[in-house]
Amino acid sequence: MEKLSIIKIGGNIIEDETSLNNFLKLFSELEGNKILVHGGGKKATFIASKLGIESKMVNGRRITDAETLEVITMVYGGLVNKNVVAKLQSLNINAIGLTGADINSIQSDKRPVKEIDFGFVGDVKKVANHSIDKLIKADFTPVFCAITHDGNGQLLNTNADTIASTIAVAMSKIYNTSIYYCFELNGVLEDFNDKTSVIQQINTEKYQNLLANNIITDGMIPKIDNCFDALNNGVQKVHIGNTAMFTKENTNFTTITL
């Protein structure tokens, strides 16, 4: 089975021109088949505020009303996505920018209203792995933004971490897939105040110990639960760290396996 790397980058890399350029250079040098997934939440919040639209967040998740969805579509699908695609072209990577609506690649259901109405937020229900594979086979590098659709003409704001893991699970039927979650920290930390205290290997047993000792808490728990979910559904490995994990010299990042 051929290998496929799915790399997700967060807002802090997108916001900073130097970090983005450095990352895209490393991404362009990465061997083999690859897919890039990006968010852009900070940029969306900034542009929304310039337009006089207040951004409402609950537990780190954005409430997406109709106005906010328009901003997100402009920022994620337009400004951020096309900027990344253009930069990749300059590095000789034949990138193609996509939302989940393009080639019907990612369909979602609108999240049902429970305690909170998240508005136009999607939970992924299916990924068209064979359509995405046609792009890869044609030597295109897909670049997905964090927007999906419901199949009935409605775009939906969707968590970029989730998009990365659901694409990886779907593509694992065709490829040996790995996910790289790329953010500003070196990896999952033993001590949040010590940025060098990276836990290099986490398996199921180790994870239970880390939870029991309150070493992994808050927002990192859903992120790692998401990683194990992907591993239980066909993904080979998940890596978490900063852009340096794409350099040959660096071994100081977190790898999650079963």
Image (cartoon, rainbow, N blue to C red):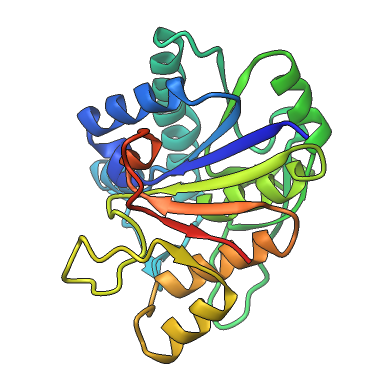
Whether residue 159 is visible, yes or no, is no
Look at the picture and state if 125 lies above or below 116. Answer: above
Quadrant of the rendered image containing residue 60: bottom left
Look at the picture and state if 207 lies above or below 202. Answer: below
Quadrant of the rendered image containing residue 203: bottom right
In terms of depth relative to the viewer, which is nearer, 131 or 243?
243
Whether residue 31 is visible, yes or no, is yes
In terms of depth relative to the viewer, which is nearer, 216 or 50?
216
Q: Quadrant of the N terminus?
A: top right
Q: Position of residue 75 (x, y in %)?
A: 41, 35
Q: Going 71% across and 65% down the picture, which residue do you hit?
A: 232
Look at the picture and state if 237 lies above or below 207. Answer: above
In terms of depth relative to the viewer, which is nearer, 251 or 20?
251
Q: Position of residue 59 (x, y in %)?
A: 40, 73
Residue located farthest toward the left when viewing the structure as drawn: 193
In terms of depth relative to the viewer, which is nearer, 182 or 210?
210
Q: How many marks?
A: 0
Q: Position of residue 138 (x, y in %)?
A: 73, 13
Q: Going 44% across and 17% down the picture, which residue do you hit?
A: 88
Look at the picture and state if 256 lies above or below 134. Answer: below
Residue located farthest toward the bottom when viewing the structure as drawn: 212
Image check: 240 left or right of 178?
Answer: left
Q: Going 66% across and 43% down the picture, which residue do you hit?
A: 177
Q: Quadrant of the C terminus?
A: bottom right
Q: Position of residue 188 (x, y in %)?
A: 36, 64
